[in-house]
Amino acid sequence: MSTTQSAAIGIIGGADGPTAIFVTSNGFVPQLLSVAAALAIGYLLGSLMFGIIVSKGLFHDDVRSHGSGNAGSTNILRTYGKGAAILALAGDMGKGVLAVFLARWAACLIFGLPLDCAGAAFGPEGFNVGAAAAFAALLGHMKPLYFGFKGGKGVAVAAGTILAAAPRVFVALLVVFVVVVSISRIVSLTSITCAVCYPIFTAVDCVLAGSSHTVFNTVCALVMAAIVVWLHRTNIQRLKNGTEYKFGSKK
């Protein structure tokens, strides 16, 4: 950090080690700018809809004109098969990972925040470049700038941001995903279950690790989970009616 900012920096131990910093009032501006950059990075990357890119690039078609009208991997799977679904899933998860890491590096390289603190919550106010990038990436996936603001439900991109920001939580959610989808063969039910578990696992992870930002991280997880569940409201209705798609069933 440049001497002109004259800000004192302290390190706070987070769930994954010394990842959080707090800056005195003179350093508030670079904190705020780093969060703004994270929001921009997350949204622009989140708007890259790989379901649409794959369907248009490989099949000269728009997946949103088929099935559920969604640009997610499940609709890709039903419409074009496993190979296309894997490509879309990898792309959507990858942009989530990239959004978090680019936001952290921007905080370091552009705004002068310490490298080992780049992914952390900033100060008692709880500014968090990782959380900002994750939320914006989810928003970009829901309302993509490049594709007429008609996107997907955000499960894959949310998984990517969790992998980058909280790998232990990601592993726990992956176990839940495998178990539920193996039993139910319903992706939407599995996604909703993982969304419900996400804030719980986040809170447990932070408490066990002695994080100083348990409340903030849990609230962020709760907001993202609520968005994902809300985007699955039509799936919830089909689950109630017993008409939701299962793996192996006919279209």
Image (cartoon, rainbow, N blue to C red):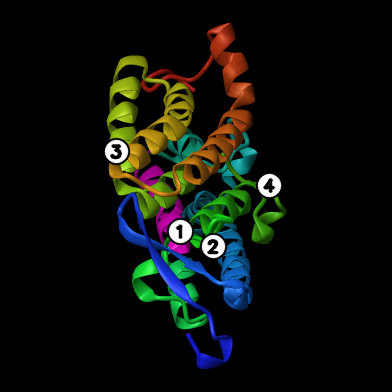
Q: Residues within 10 Å of mark 3 (few under 14, many from 20)?
A: few
Magenta span includes 186: no
Q: Earlier in the sequence, mark 2 or mark 3?
A: 2
In the image, residue 104 above or below residue 13 = below
Judging by the rendered image, the residue that carries numbered circle 3 is 208
Q: Earlier in the sequence, mark 1 or mark 2?
A: 2
Residue 167 in the figure: left or right of residue 108? left
Residue appearing at x 46%, y 21% in the figure: 189
Crowd tier of the residue under label 1, counting other residues whose Cα lies within 10 Å: few below 14, some 14–19, many 20 or above: many
Please state which amino acid type lies under the numbered disc 1.
Lys
The residue beneath circle 2 is 45
Coordinates of residue 186 in the picture (x, y in percent): 42, 21
Contact flag, marks 1 and 2 (Cβ < 8 Å):
yes
On the image, which quarter does residue 47 sit in? bottom right
- List the residue tagged with mark 4: 150
Circle 2: element type: helix
Residues marked 4 and 2 touching at CB (< 8 Å)? no
Mark-to-mark CA distance, 1 and 2: 6 Å
Which residue corresponds to mark 1?
95
Magenta residues, start to end: 82-100
- Look at the magenta stretch and give its main secondary structure: helix
Specify the amino acid type for callout 3.
Answer: Leu
